[in-house]
Image: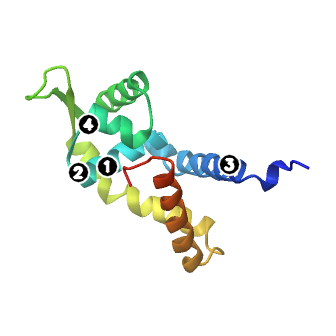
């Protein structure tokens, strides 16, 4: 008999949706979506990204990525310029405001999820992270 609750895909998707809901709650005061958070965090790490690289990080298509970046630029979180190498490509960097959030958001995120996951042992978290990275690699996600 097929039992939905016994399906790996159902459970992974369900946890992803629940984590997304918590990300939205965590960043509500900053009016950030989970995708905007991913872009900020990636820019803190890499400093400069093309729109294509951002599409790969967020798993969004070109129109959605363009909308997200436009909103972030309107909110003064990022700056976008034409690439010097390819005028058709856009290069995205942090604005001063986007960079300053690095002092606040990671700590807020850690505190938010620490309270939610307090009964989930650190050893299990580490094991789960390893398994999820393996699954991502098997599914062709080479960004991790």
Q: Which mark is residue 3?
A: none
Do the residues bearing badges 2 and 1 touch, measured as CB atoms within 8 Å?
A: yes
Q: Which residue is labeled 4 in the image?
A: 78
Closer to the camera: disc 4 or disc 3? 3
Q: Secondary structure at mark 2?
A: helix
Residue 80 place in picture, x, y as percent: 21, 29
Question: Where does residue 110 sit, x and y in percent of width and height?
Answer: 47, 64
Mark 3 or mark 1, which is nearer the start of the sequence?
3
Judged left or right of residue 79, residue 54 is: right
Give how far apart the Cα atoms at labels 1 and 4 are.
12 Å
Depth order, front residue of 137/64: 137
For the C terminus, the image quarter is bottom left
Residue 5: horizontal and vertical position, in percent?
A: 81, 53
Q: Which residue is mark 1?
A: 42
- For label 3, the SS is helix
Residue 122 visible in this rendered orientation of the protein: yes
Numbered circle sitting on residue 46: 2
In the picture, measured across the screen, residue 107 lies left or right of residue 49, that is: right
Q: Nearer the viewer, mark 4 or mark 2?
A: 2
Position of residue 65 in the picture relative to residue 8 (left or right) = left
Q: Can you name the residue that lies furthest to the left here?
A: 84
Q: Which residue is mark 3?
A: 9
């Amino acid at each position: 008999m097929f039992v939905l609750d016994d399906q790996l895909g159902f459970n992974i998707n369900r946890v992803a949706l629940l984590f997304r809901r918590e990300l939205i709650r965590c960043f509500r005061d900053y009016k950030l979506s989970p995708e905007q958070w991913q872009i900020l965090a990636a820019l803190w790490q890499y400093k400069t990204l093309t729109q294509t690289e951002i599409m790969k990080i967020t798993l969004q298509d070109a129109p959605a990525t363009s909308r997200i970046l436009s909103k972030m630029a309107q909110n003064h979180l990022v700056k976008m310029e034409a690439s010097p190498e390819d005028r058709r490509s856009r290069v995205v960097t942090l604005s001063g405001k986007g960079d300053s959030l690095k002092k606040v958001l990671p700590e807020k995120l850690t505190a938010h999820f620490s309270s939610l996951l307090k009964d989930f042992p650190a050893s299990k978290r580490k094991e789960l992270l390893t398994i999820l990275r393996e699954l991502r690699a098997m599914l062709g996600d080479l960004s991790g």
